[in-house]
Image: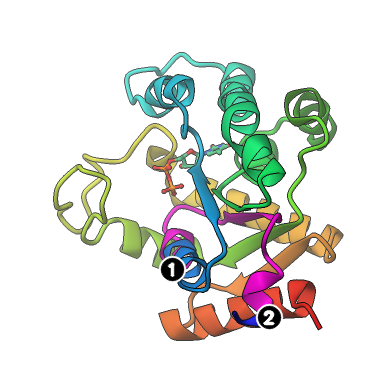
Amino acid sequence: MSSWVSGLAGRFIVFDGIDGSGKSTQLRRLVSACTEDGVRVCQVREPGGTTVGERIREILLDRTQEGMTLRCEMLLYMASRVQLVEEKIRPALDRRELVLADRFVSSTLAYQGSAGGISRDDILAVARVAIGPTWPDLVVIFDVDPASASRRTKGVERGKGRGVRPAGSSLFDDRIEQRGDAYQAKVRQGFLEQAAADPDRYLLIDGTAPEDDVWEALVKGLRARFARS
Ligand code: TYD
């Protein structure tokens, strides 16, 4: 077993970034590497990942929910998260599995906080109630500019069961995606600020590089933090 992979057992790692940052592709690569090397992985995504969470996800991403207030939106993301932490994440950590989460509190801080306007203190206060001591060991941010990201998301749709998306179409955008590039730019800035403020807990990776280079940067970062000597 590679030492960097074995060092991941029992850790909680979050992948985050703006829509179209390429985080999900890298997450799949890491899951394969771990599985091949015998480290058990619990993979979760937000919002959703539980029966209750998937119902909350439908409301959150439904384009017809135009009247949802920002604080209601924030609390729904957090409600989905509580269920995920209690039902999936904590038990998996107790079993010494690697928990890999596609988004977590870092997304709420960036989307509803930096871009939406809710204060960091308010979001963290709710997060403390919601997740208790279950904070990630590491948050990996895949950084891309909104223009490249939106080219990716508006190209061929990958595996969300919504068929092929015509390039440049917004017909398939969910409630959050339809907020456009200016909103995404603020979200990106939010992620960059989080990473700069807490370099021990965050790993910032250039997501515009070719996929293999992004993977290499990810492995290097994980090795530096978790490899067993
Ligand atoms: P999803 O289709 O899962 O997007 P992605 O594949 O990019 O993760 O949709 C999740 C959307 O919800 C995405 O636009 C980001 C947004 N979001 C928030 O606004 N706040 C949050 O706390 C979370 C977890 C997600």
Helix, strand or loop at mark 2: helix
Q: What's the residue type where badge 1 is placed?
A: Ser
Q: Where is residue 24 in the image (x, y as percent from the top left)?
A: 44, 59
Identify the residue at image location x=81%, y=83%: 229
Mark 1, Cα crowd under 10 Å, few <14 / some 14-19 / many 20+, is some
Residue 50 visible, this angle? yes
Q: As drawn, is 225 to the left or to the right of 178?
A: right
Question: Foreground: 2 or 177?
Answer: 2
Q: In which quarter of the image is residue 7?
A: bottom right
Q: Which amino acid does label 2 sit on?
A: Ser
- Work out whether residue 112 or residue 133 is closer to the camera in this orientation and state it: 133
The residue lying at 79 percent from left, 23 percent from top is 129
- Would residue 14 be counted in the magenta stretch? yes
Q: Is mark 1 on a helix, strand or loop?
A: helix
Return the residue at label 2: 3
Where is 17 relative to 111, above or below? Answer: below
Measured along the vertical axis of the image, is residue 209 above or below residue 119? below
Residue at left 47%, top 28%?
50
Q: Which residue is drawn at 55% across and 57% down?
A: 40
Confirm whether residue 210 shows in the render: no
Quadrant placement of the N terminus: bottom right
The stretch of residues the image draws in magenta is 3-26
Magenta span contains residue 129 = no
Q: Is residue 118 left or right of residue 162?
A: right
Name which quarter of the figure residue 153 lies in: bottom left
Residue at the disc numbered 1: 32
